[in-house]
Amino acid sequence: MRIALQAIAGLIFGLGLLISGMADPAKVLNFLDLFGSFDPSLILVMGGAVMLTFVGYRLAFRRGQPWLASRFDLPVLKAIDLRLVAGAALFGLGWGLAGFCPGPALVSITLAGTSGLIFVASMLLAMTVTQSWLVRRQQVAGADAS
């Protein structure tokens, strides 16, 4: 049941990206082109998403417990460290250069877009390399501590 609801939520999200045009990287790149073909519609999509999320969180937390779990799993880390800032910078850089972030890139693959496929493949490669590097770094730190 839980997986089915997650799949439905993902489909709704993907449809929202398609309907709003956010699966088209040109839409995002035009938003970032302030002195050229600027398209402010991304602000409206983001504003609508923020408002809906605000209301959704208020309603969910009013229940006290999620429907399909014993408790809410909220982020516990509050520190702004180099890893967070570097990740955010890389995310923004990739978004600005390619016009994709992970969600719209996945949706664009369903539209037979090669640019989305290249982006997703590069993203998965980068995630794999980063995870391997972090594991290796942790192993080295553990060996040094011994």
Image (cartoon, grey):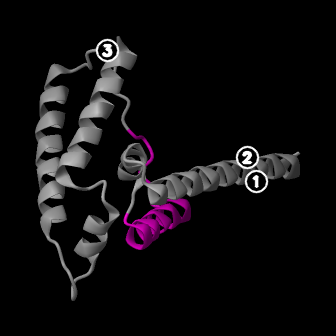
Where's residue 22, x and y in %? Answer: 26, 56
State whether the magenta stretch is mostly helix, strand or loop. Answer: helix
| Between discs 3 and 1, the one toward the N terminus | 3
Q: Would residue 77 be counted in the magenta stretch?
A: yes
Q: Is residue 40 above or below residue 106?
A: below
Q: Residues within 10 Å of mark 3 (few under 14, many from 20)?
A: few
Residue at coordinates 18% horizontally, 78% vertically from top-left? 38
Q: Would residue 22 be found to the left or right of residue 144 on screen? A: left
Q: Would residue 80 be found to the left or right of residue 133 on screen? A: left
Where's residue 112, x and y in %? Answer: 42, 48
Q: Are marks 1 and 2 in contact (CB under 8 Å)?
A: yes
Q: Would residue 131 be found to the left or right of residue 38 on screen? A: right
Amino acid under disc 3: Leu
Is residue 70 among the parts visible in the rendering?
A: no
Q: Residues within 10 Å of mark 1 (few under 14, many from 20)?
A: few
Quadrant into which the C terminus falls: top right
Amino acid under disc 1: Arg
Identify the residue under disc 1. Answer: 137
Where's residue 103, x and y in %? Answer: 37, 48
Identify the residue under disc 3. Answer: 68
Q: Are marks 3 and 2 in contact (CB under 8 Å)?
A: no
Residue at coordinates 26% horizontally, 15% vertically from top-left? 67
Q: Residues within 10 Å of mark 2 (few under 14, many from 20)?
A: few
Disc 3 element: loop
Q: Would residue 142 be counted in the magenta stretch?
A: no
Identify the residue under disc 2. Answer: 135
- Gap in Å between the C-alphas at discs 3 and 2? 32 Å
- Gap in Å between the C-alphas at discs 3 and 1? 36 Å
Q: Would residue 38 be found to the left or right of residue 109 on screen? A: left
Disc 2 element: helix
Disc 1 element: helix
